[in-house]
């Protein structure tokens, strides 16, 4: 997730000295992916690069760098018996001290991210060229010293959808909005618990209910919508979205699910309820002309197998896990991992 952009911007704008710690390379097994970040200040750490001895050692190094000049430092950490971690891989960690206020590249990145414009952060690991931010049309930051060849490499990665990666002594980090789009219908106890659970993911959530003044404690990546006709909000979702339907009304649930199942671009459609509720809905769907191929996309009951608890928090954990699994399977299918005639999300009761 990209919350680090706001966190780092707020800290540096307030004049706080920080070190931005980033996983810049991995060989073998490691606790976090390339691009994972942690912010270290005089008094706190924000985020994680995987915990354990690696994070402990990196935090100590970052604290020592807090008073240093703003030059990136790249360190290599073998994860084995010497580190007390059994991952066994090798991790490159980038330390970037920031002590002179909000950097221009970070200010520009925050503005671009707020406008949902994809960008690439370009860092010279030798520290000879300042950090720049590259978009499809513009370059921000150290524009004078960032070569055209480096800008072209950044744009190639952006177009190809690459994750954070290194090329020679340059580190490229794509910063793009999440393509995990979720619609949650219903803001009751279970709906609220589900949204709180899902909001911790790198995702965009539209939370919809027909009742007035129902929403409470809304996370930053959640947009709340009060609508007298919640089913109409299905059309506002982009392709390959995930849906969870759990309103206070079976009639509203049915209308929402019917509209979802009439789309042919759904990654996941989960309906809270029992097997008997599913069978009643199936019968009515067929009466409304829906084919079995579309109805098979409905998941009801929801939640990964083996979790039988009925408390809102328990349902939320089980449903969030199932949705995330379905989303990843659908993403693989989109990349032609699955045969064309096999849908990874079908579940017949």
Image (cartoon, rainbow, N blue to C red):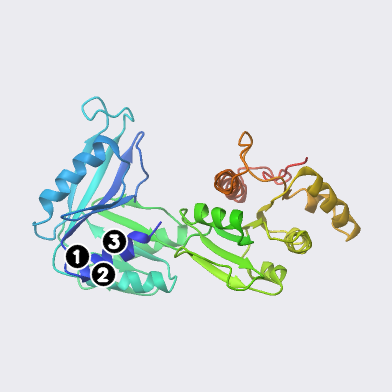
Badge 2 local density, few (<14 within 10 Å), some, or many (20+)? some
Disc 2 to disc 3, how far (Cα)? 10 Å
Q: Nearer the viewer, residue 302 or 241?
A: 302
Q: Is residue 136 visible?
A: no
Q: Are marks 1 and 2 in contact (CB under 8 Å)?
A: yes
Q: Earlier in the sequence, mark 1 or mark 3?
A: 3
Q: Nearer the viewer, mark 2 or mark 3?
A: 2
Disc 1 to disc 2, how far (Cα)? 9 Å
Q: Is 245 placed above or below 142 here?
A: above
Residue 105's disc is 2
Q: Earlier in the sequence, mark 2 or mark 3?
A: 2
Q: Nearer the viewer, mark 1 or mark 2?
A: 2
Position in image of residue 242 (x %, y %): 62, 56
344 relative position to 116: left or right: right
Q: Is 151 placed above or below 76 here?
A: below
Query: Could you tell me which secondary element the residue under label 2 belongs to?
Result: helix
Residue underneath mark 3: 122
Badge 1 local density, few (<14 within 10 Å), some, or many (20+)? many
Query: Could you tell me which secondary element the residue under label 3 belongs to?
Result: strand
Position in image of residue 117 (x %, y %): 43, 71
309 relative position to 72: left or right: right
Q: Earlier in the sequence, mark 1 or mark 2?
A: 2
Residue 111's disc is none
Residue underneath mark 1: 130
Q: Is residue 94 visible?
A: yes
In the rendered image, the residue lying farthest to the top is 81
Badge 3 local density, few (<14 within 10 Å), some, or many (20+)? many
Q: Quarter-wise, where is residue 112 in the image?
A: bottom left
Looking at the rendered image, the quarter that the N terminus falls into is bottom left
Looking at the rendered image, the quarter that the C terminus falls into is top right
Residue at 36% across, 53% down: 164
């Amino acid at each position: 997730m990209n919350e680090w952009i706001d966190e780092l911007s707020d800290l540096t704008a307030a004049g706080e000295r920080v070190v931005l710690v980033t996983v810049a390379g991995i060989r073998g097994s490691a606790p976090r992916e390339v691009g994972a970040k942690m912010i270290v200040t005089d008094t706190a750490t924000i985020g994680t690069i995987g915990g354990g001895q690696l994070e402990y050692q990196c935090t100590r190094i970052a604290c020592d760098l807090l008073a240093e000049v703003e030059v990136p430092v790249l360190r290599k950490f073998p994860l084995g018996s010497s580190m007390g971690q059994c991952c066994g891989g090798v991790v490159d960690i980038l330390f970037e001290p920031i002590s002179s206020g909000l950097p221009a590249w970070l200010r520009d990145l925050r503005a671009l991210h707020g406008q949902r414009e994809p960008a690439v952060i370009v860092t010279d690991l030798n520290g000879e060229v300042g950090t720049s931010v590259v978009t499809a049309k513009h370059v921000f930051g150290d524009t004078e010293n960032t070569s055209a060849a480096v800008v072209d490499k950044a744009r190639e990665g952006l177009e190809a959808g690459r994750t954070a990666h290194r090329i020679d002594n340059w580190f490229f980090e794509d910063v793009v909005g999440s393509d995990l789009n979720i619609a949650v219908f219903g803001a009751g106890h279970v709906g609220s618990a589900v949204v709180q659970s899902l909001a911790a993911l790198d995702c965009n959530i539209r939370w919809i209910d027909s009742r007035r003044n129902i929403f409470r404690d809304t996370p930053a990546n959640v947009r709340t919508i009060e609508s007298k006709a919640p089913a109409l909000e299905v059309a506002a979702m982009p392709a390959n979205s995930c849906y969870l339907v759990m309103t206070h009304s079976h009639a509203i649930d049915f209308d929402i699910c019917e509209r979802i199942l009439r789309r042919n671009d759904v990654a996941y459609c989960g309906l809270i309820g029992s097997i008997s509720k599913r069978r009643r809905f199936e019968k009515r769907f067929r009466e409304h002309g829906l084919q079995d191929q579309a109805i098979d996309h409905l998941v009801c009951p929801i939640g990964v197998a083996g979790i039988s608890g009925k408390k809102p928090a328990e349902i939320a954990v089980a449903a969030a896990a199932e949705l995330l699994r379905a989303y990843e399977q659908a993403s693989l299918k989109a990349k032609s991992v699955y045969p064309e005639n096999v849908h990874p999300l079908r579940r017949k009761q």
